Image (tube, rainbow, N blue to C red):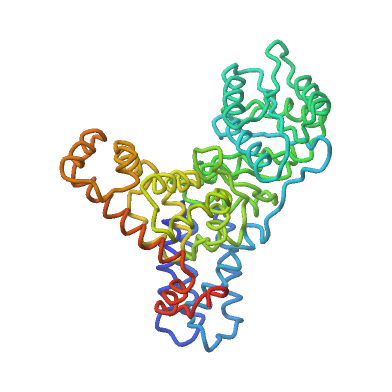
Amino acid sequence: MFDRLQDRLERSFKVLKGHGQISEINVAETMKEIRRALLDADVNYKIAKEFTNTVREKALGADVLKSLTPGQLLTKITHDELTNLMGEEEVPLDTKGNPAIILMSGLQGSGKTTHSGKLALFLKSKKGKQPLLVAADVYRPAAIDQLHVVGEQIGVEVYSDRDQKDPVKIATDAVQYARSNGKNVVIVDTAGRLSIDEQMMNEIAAIKSAINPNETLFVVDAMTGQDAVNTAKEFNERLDYEGVILTKLDGDARGGAALSIRSVVNKPIKFIGTGEKMEALDVFYPKRMADRILGMGDVVSLVERVQDQIDVEEARRLQKKLHKNTFDLDDFLNQIQQIKKMGNVKDLMGMIPGMGKAIKNLDIDNDSFKHVEAIIRSMTPRERSNPDILNSSRKRRIAEGSGTSVQEVNQLIKQFADTRKMMKLMSNKKNMASLMKQMGGGGIPGLN
């Protein structure tokens, strides 16, 4: 999402490259470029101006440390101010109470129903909650059906009453149902409209008054840029909600909404939608987002995603196979499935420091694995466990069965061999420590 902004900011910092000290002239030139970059990202003009003025004042008032170049110092100041702009610290969801009640609001098409499901899955899988989804959109029968499909997909019960046309009654009845059936979180999916109107605002305000939710969340599409910020402001004036879920952060949004909402509405972004899968919902961390905007990666989030998908027993089994050199193509296929569960591959690679710029023009998505999976699944169990037996005739049969070419089969076998060698190396602590020293890392604590 922030590729263009990242490029523009990088060019902005180059203005200071080669300068021995920060001066009013070179800072002014840099600030002009940063302001243009923010405006190009669809950040509110007033916010962009205030932001660059603050960075300018801090830059001119800061001592240039001997170990830093002016560009590095300005990058740090910019990073700190980006973090402040987006809210400094993450704001947790309030799930106290029995049940805790979360009211979802937003325009039609913002992803409200889908993200109600994503939030339910997040609370179920990561917080150990027993959520209940509530279909309170009485205007679109498809909305009720959609929520039931989502609920079935994630294993969460959905409360609906197709005969009841009063959304307030549906919501209050659902809360009572939750209390009686051991559900400790109620997520109410409300109706949306194509634009803000009095009927919608009165209706959701009535629901809020009746069920007194712990949290009212506003779901907004990041692709709409400043329109998202304006809509967030209007909703907040009527609902006084507690937080925002910003959707489609994996798309081609310019990033202005993420950078502007906190300042304009004075309400935190609590979650961000990062993909189509139900697992693609992340807690919003301002500092981590600032890291990504400035091309520093987001290793912490990457590690968290990996940890979420790791099965401890499976990891132990895999480590034993690596030590015995019996890691085979079935294991390789299983690892691909684990990677796909973590989200968009390009997004994951972008979390590695320095990788964002390197892969920005590459077309990488989870569909890239399809031909690999097809090739492996076209093999016999014996071929998967022992790829060394793959001769020319076997490869031709596999290529025909998977709709690929012999060349692609050969390429996969080579990639598998290289992966097996690397994984075996990384499974050995002494080898890993030696590798890190060769790379100039001096080793890793715990591996020396």
Depth check: give the residue in front, 145 or 388: 388
Residue 149 in picture, x, y percent from top left: 57, 24
Work out which residue is located at the far top of the displayed protein and give it: 163
Q: Is 393 above or below relative to 22?
A: above
Residue 277 in picture, x, y percent from top left: 51, 38
Residue at 80% of width from left, 21% of height from top?
173
How many dots with numbers?
0
Residue 57 in picture, x, y percent from top left: 60, 75
Q: Is 132 above or below relative to 410?
A: above
Residue 196 in picture, x, y percent from top left: 63, 31
Residue at 44% of width from left, 61% of height from top?
323
Work out which residue is located at the far left of the displayed protein and give it: 392
Q: Is 214 above or below relative to 411?
A: above
Depth check: give the residue in front, 272 or 426: 426
User: Visible in this render: residue 382?
Assistant: yes
User: Visible in this render: residue 40?
Assistant: no
- 101 on left or right of 392: right
Q: Is 9 above or below relative to 204?
A: below
